[in-house]
Amino acid sequence: MAEQIQKKPVKIVETVLRDAHQSLIATRMTTEEMLPIVEKMDQIGYHAVECWGGATFDACLRFLKEDPWMRLRKLREGFKNTKLQMLFRGQNILGYRHYADDVVEYFVQKSIANGMDIIRIFDALNDMRNLQCAVNATNKEKKASGRGHAQVAVCYTLGDAYTTEYYVDIAKKIEDMGADSICLKDMAGLLTP
């Protein structure tokens, strides 16, 4: 008897509320500019909407004079059927330097408590040490509250050292550290189908 093949539908994550304006207009979209489209986006059927993290936190505070936590709560309120996802810079959280483990843990806890579902964790150099604390914190919240998904991104690049074996090894390490899912992060647009 032939083995039954399990269907795994493609899940689409929309990144327009984080990456599109981060890449195109230096993360200057205000929360009020985002809110009118939220209800329509929520009806599309996306697996998740990546709407927070990366440079959004810094830009809210520094340039837009907004409370990034209020943005997250307003987006959570509007997206009733769609998971919210954030980009999390591992041990750097959303900043530009390393933070202590307890700060990482508390930030993950508060992100989930304020409405975040999926924490997409990455380190630009695929340094596992910079990912582990955030994965542990997300899993701790999932155990405590039933909410939180630790997705770890493998950062893709080209070069002699970056072989198929390299990426398989990284993926196995990510699985071993307790990630719920793995994704490829191709920041430079190098990966072809």
Image (spheres, rainbow, N blue to C red):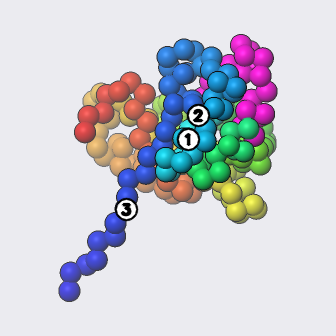
**Residue 118 in picture, x, y percent from top left:** 60, 48
Q: Are marks 1 and 3 in contact (CB under 8 Å)?
A: no
Mark carried by residue 37: 2
In the figure, 174 relative to 5: above or below?
above
Residue 66 or 162: which is nearer the viewer? 66
Residue nearest the viewer, comparing 170 with 8: 8
The answer to whether residue 113 is left or right of residue 2 is right
Q: Residues within 10 Å of mark 2 (few under 14, many from 20)?
A: few
Distance CA(mark 3)–CA(mark 2): 29 Å
Q: Which region shows up in magenta?
A: 53-73
Q: Which residue is mark 3?
A: 8
174 versus 145 height, above or below: above
Tell me, yes or no, whether the two marked residues, 1 and 2, touch with CB atoms within 8 Å.
yes
Q: Position of residue 56 (x, y in %)?
A: 65, 25
Name the quadrant containing residue 95.
top right
Which-is-in-front pick, marks 3 and 2? 2
- Dot 3, crowdedness within 10 Å: few (<14), some or many (≥20)? few
Compare marks 1 and 3 and give the one earlier in the sequence: 3
Q: Judge whether residue 63 is colored magenta.
A: yes
Report the Cα–Cα distance between label 1 and label 3. 26 Å
